[in-house]
Amino acid sequence: AVTPVTAANDITASSDGFAADRRMNRVIDKFHGDPGLRYAMEAHAEGDPDAVILTLAIRDKAACELRIPKSRYDAFALLELIERHTTPATLQ
């Protein structure tokens, strides 16, 4: 599921410069609490007036951040695309 996050200090570069690392670690940590979870994401909508920063991880495969224009962001459509285009073969 997509977890909306509104903490603005997690969006913009903080004094230590590791906001993106904190977001990524928080999303990856979700796998530790749920062994059946294949995807983990958080949508960060507060830090940029024009975009949503989506932090996405696929278990044991990849993790990334996407900057999506707010006018085009649809969390449910994104989940549907991931489910439709991810097969057991792509997760191996």
Image: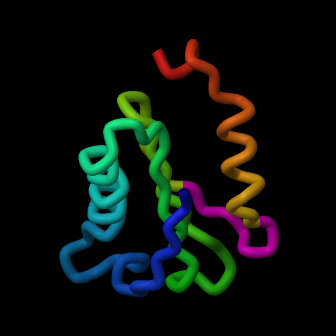
Residue 44 at what x, y percent from top left? 51, 73
Q: Please say if 22 is above or below 13.
A: above
Magenta residue span: 66-72
Report the residue at 36% width, 77% height from top: 10
Report the residue at 73% width, 45% height from top: 80
Residue nearer the viewer, 62 or 91: 91
Q: Is residue 29 left or right of residue 68?
A: left
Quadrant showing the N terminus:
bottom right
Residue 71 lies in the magenta-colored region: yes
Residue nearer the viewer, 7 or 77: 77
Report the residue at 57% width, 13% height from top: 89
Residue 4 at what x, y percent from top left? 52, 73
Q: Is residue 32 left or right of residue 64?
A: left
Q: Is residue 69 left or right of residue 32?
A: right
Q: How many marks?
A: 0
Q: Please say if 32 is above or below 47.
A: above
Q: Is residue 53 left or right of residue 35?
A: right
Report the residue at 46% width, 77% height from top: 5
Residue 8 at what x, y percent from top left? 42, 86
Q: Toward which corner of the image does residue 90 lie, by quadrant?
A: top right
